[in-house]
Every structure is written in C-alpha cells, then in structure tokens.
Image: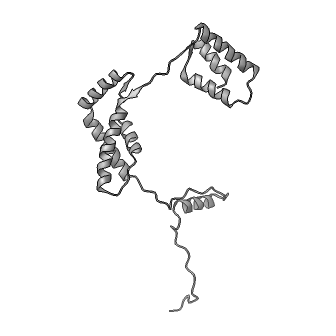
Amino acid sequence: MRIEQIIEKALKDGYLTPLMESEVGRLCDTASELSIEEYMALDKLMGALLSGEVVTVARKQFINVMEELVLSEAIDQVTKIEDKSDRFLEVGDIAAYALNRLPPLYATTEKGAQYQRKRAKQDLMDLINHQVKDAIAKYLERPHFGADRQAIRKQTSKDLMGQISNMLEGCAPGFEPKPQRSNGLHGLR
C-alpha cells in the first residue's frame, strides 16, 4: 500500500493501527524523497490525530502462557534425552510442533497470566506432556541430512528427458552405475 492509501483508510476508519503506523514509517524511511501528495496526506493524518478524529490503537502486550509451559516442558524432556545420548535436539522446533497442536492461553496482565498458568497446570499438563513427547518423536524420525546434501541443480537441458535425467542425477547422485571400461576380451572365455 502507498502512504496515501494507508492514511485514507485510517481517516475513514478513525483508527491508526500499529501495523498501519509501522508501514507508514517504513515507507517514509525507505523513500528517497516524498511527493507533495504524501506530505499532504501525512499532514492530514497529523491534524486528524491532534483533533481526535483518528485515534491510535495502543500496542498491547500479550502473554501466551502456553508458550512458557511448552518451552519449559520441552527443555526438561530434551535435556533428559541429550544427557543419555550424543544427539542434539532443537528445542525451538519441538516447542513449535507441540504449540501448533495445543490451545493458546493468552493473558494481558500478570494476574491473568497467573490464572492461565494455574488453570493449565491443573487441566492441561498431561496434554502438554503428551504433545511435547509426540513432537520429540517426530523430530527424531525426520531424516538427517549430512554435509553431503546438495541443492537440486538448475535445469539447462531443453528436452524433457534431459531435464528428468538432470533432476534425478541431482536427487540421487551416483545411483546409476557408471559404464565399465572394456578390457578388450569380449566374447573370449
């Protein structure tokens, strides 16, 4: 969106959201020079903000208590596994997998967060524990790509069979056996 469009929407709605504010800021920062129309739109927005015709929507801090609980459980379970083996597990991947399968528990105050923590510990810890275990199992099942992993090469052949051959060679290098050199003794036994 252009600056004028964002400001027009703010004037129409009567609200300037944090996203709109940051987008206008980004556009102003990246522009080498603002046009007269952009300056006029910004001036109109400033007047509307000062008069109260447009109000800013405050940035609200949200706390997702579920993130705290899942991360704590994931760290506990991962630490136990890593202590018993030489395997490194990515806690962030495991927590994200589990969080995608659990309900969020948002709060806007610390008192609300305490309530959500208490409720979750009473009602949801078994589910959290299960989802983290499942996330670890999925993480351990995924294929390990070592240093020999190669990106699929860009296609240069124009014929279909050549493209397919190049793709297969990129996906499975060395799969087809190389032709053996002849020792010149064909047909002799």
Q: Is residue 18 visible?
A: yes
Q: Is residue 103 visible?
A: no
Q: Is residue 3 above or below residue 139?
A: above
Residue 139, horizontal then vertical, whole percent: 37, 49
The residue at the point 59 percent across, 61 percent down is 166
Q: Is residue 93 left or right of residue 149?
A: left
Q: Is residue 53 above or below residue 71?
A: above
The residue at the point 62 percent across, 61 percent down is 162
The residue at the point 58 percent across, 88 percent down is 184
| Residue at the far left in the pictured view | 122
Residue 35, horizontal then vertical, whole percent: 75, 23
Q: Is residue 44 above or below residue 152?
A: above
Residue 163, horizontal then vertical, whole percent: 61, 58
Q: How does the figure colour the protein chain or chains?
A: one colour
Q: Quadrant of residue 37?
A: top right
Q: Quadrant of the N terminus?
A: top right
| Residue at the far right in the pictured view | 36
Residue 99, horizontal then vertical, whole percent: 37, 36
Q: Quadrant of residue 95?
A: top left
